[in-house]
Image (cartoon, rainbow, N blue to C red):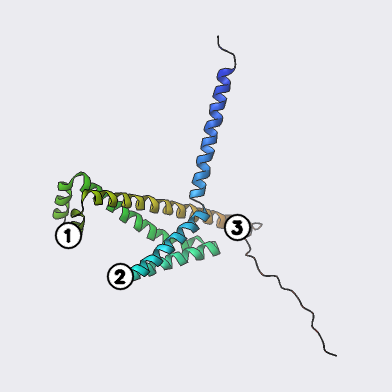
C-alpha cells in the first residue's frame, strides 16, 4: 500500500539536493575565478620567475623572465587602479603559454600512441627540434605528457580568471560612468593628528 504524499516528499528532497549541489558548484566556480585567486596565480607566477632566474642565467631565459615580470607588474597596477586595460599583456602571455602547452601535450600524446606516425610527421615537416622527444622512453614520455596537460589546464584556468575579472572591471567602470552616485573604492589613508604648537616663556 502506497502512503500518500511520500513521492512528493522524495521529489522535493531530491530537488533540494540538486539545488544544493548547483549552489556548491556555483560557489566553487566563483572562488576559482575570483580576484583573490588571480592574486594567488600572480604570486605563484612571480615565484616561478624568481626560481627560473636563480637556476638559469642564460640571456634568452632572462629576457623571457623580464617580460613575464613586466606583465605581472601591469596586473598589479590593474588591481590597484581598477583599470582592465593593464590585464591584457598578462592575458596574451597566458594565452601563449596555454597554446604552447596544449601543442606539446598533443605532440607527446602522438609520440606515445603512434610513434611511427610521430617520426614520419617530424621528418615530413622538417621539425628537427622535435627529434628530442623521439629519444624519450615510454615512462618519460608519459610523465612529460601529464605535465604538459596539467600546464595546459592550469593556464586555461588562469586565462578564464583573467577574462572574468576583466569583464567585472569593465562592467563596474560602465556603471560608474553612467551613475554618478557610484564611486570607486577609496584607499585607506593615515590619519593626521594636529599637535598644538608650544611656546617657550
Name the residue rendered at 53%, 56% in the picture: 169
Residue 128 has which mark? 1
Give the foreground label among 3 and 1.
1
Using the rendered view, name the quadrant where residue 54 is placed.
bottom left
Return the residue nearer the eye: 195 or 97: 195
Q: Residue furthest bottom?
A: 201
Q: Which of the two residues, 3 or 83, is positioned nearer the viewer here? A: 3
Residue at horizontal 62%, vertical 60%? 185
Whichever of callouts 1 and 2 sits on the residue coming sooner in the sequence is: 2
Q: Earlier in the sequence, mark 3 or mark 1?
A: 1
Q: Is residue 89 visible?
A: no
Work out how far the residue at label 3 is from the one at label 2, CA to CA, in angstroms. Answer: 43 Å
Q: Earlier in the sequence, mark 3 or mark 2?
A: 2
Badge 1 crowding class, 10 Å Cα cut-off, few under 14, some 14 to 19, many 20 or more, is few
The quarter in which the C terminus is drawn is bottom right
Provide the secondary structure element on which disc 3 rests. Answer: helix
Badge 3 is on which residue?
A: 176
Q: Position of residue 26 (x, y in %)?
A: 51, 42
- 75 lies left or right of 95: right
Q: In the visual, does 112 lie left or right of 29?
A: left
User: Which residue sits at x=14%, y=54%?
Assistant: 123
Please rate how many residues cluster around mark 3, counting C-alpha atoms within 10 Å: few if below 14, some from 14 to 19, many from 20.
Answer: some
Residue 176, horizontal then vertical, whole percent:
60, 57
Disc 1 to disc 2: CB gap under 8 Å: no
Q: Is label 3 in contact with label 1 (beta carbons under 8 Å)? A: no
The residue indicated by pointer 2 is 60
Disc 1 secondary structure class: helix
Image: 63 above or below 150: below
Amino acid at each position: 500500500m502506497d502512503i500518500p504524499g511520500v513521492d512528493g516528499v522524495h521529489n522535493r528532497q531530491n530537488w533540494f539536493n540538486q539545488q544544493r549541489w548547483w549552489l556548491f558548484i556555483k560557489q566553487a566556480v566563483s572562488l576559482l575565478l575570483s580576484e583573490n585567486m588571480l592574486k594567488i596565480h600572480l604570486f605563484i607566477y612571480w615565484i616561478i620567475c624568481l626560481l627560473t632566474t636563480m637556476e638559469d642565467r642564460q640571456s634568452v631565459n632572462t629576457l623571457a623572465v623580464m617580460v613575464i615580470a613586466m606583465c605581472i607588474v601591469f596586473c598589479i597596477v590593474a588591481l590597484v587602479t581598477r583599470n582592465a586595460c593593464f590585464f591584457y599583456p598578462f592575458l596574451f602571455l597566458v594565452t601563449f603559454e596555454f597554446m604552447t602547452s596544449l601543442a606539446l601535450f598533443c605532440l607527446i600524446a602522438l609520440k606515445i600512441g603512434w610513434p611511427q606516425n610521430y617520426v614520419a610527421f617530424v621528418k615530413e615537416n622538417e621539425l628537427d627540434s622535435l627529434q628530442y622527444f623521439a629519444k624519450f622512453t615510454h615512462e618519460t614520455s608519459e610523465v612529460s605528457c601529464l605535465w604538459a596537460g596539467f600546464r595546459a589546464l592550469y593556464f586555461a584556468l588562469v586565462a578564464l580568471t583573467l577574462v572574468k575579472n576583466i569583464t567585472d572591471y569593465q562592467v563596474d567602470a560602465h556603471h560608474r560612468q553612467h551613475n554618478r552616485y557610484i564611486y570607486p573604492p577609496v584607499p585607506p589613508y593615515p590619519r593626521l593628528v594636529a599637535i598644538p604648537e608650544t611656546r617657550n616663556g
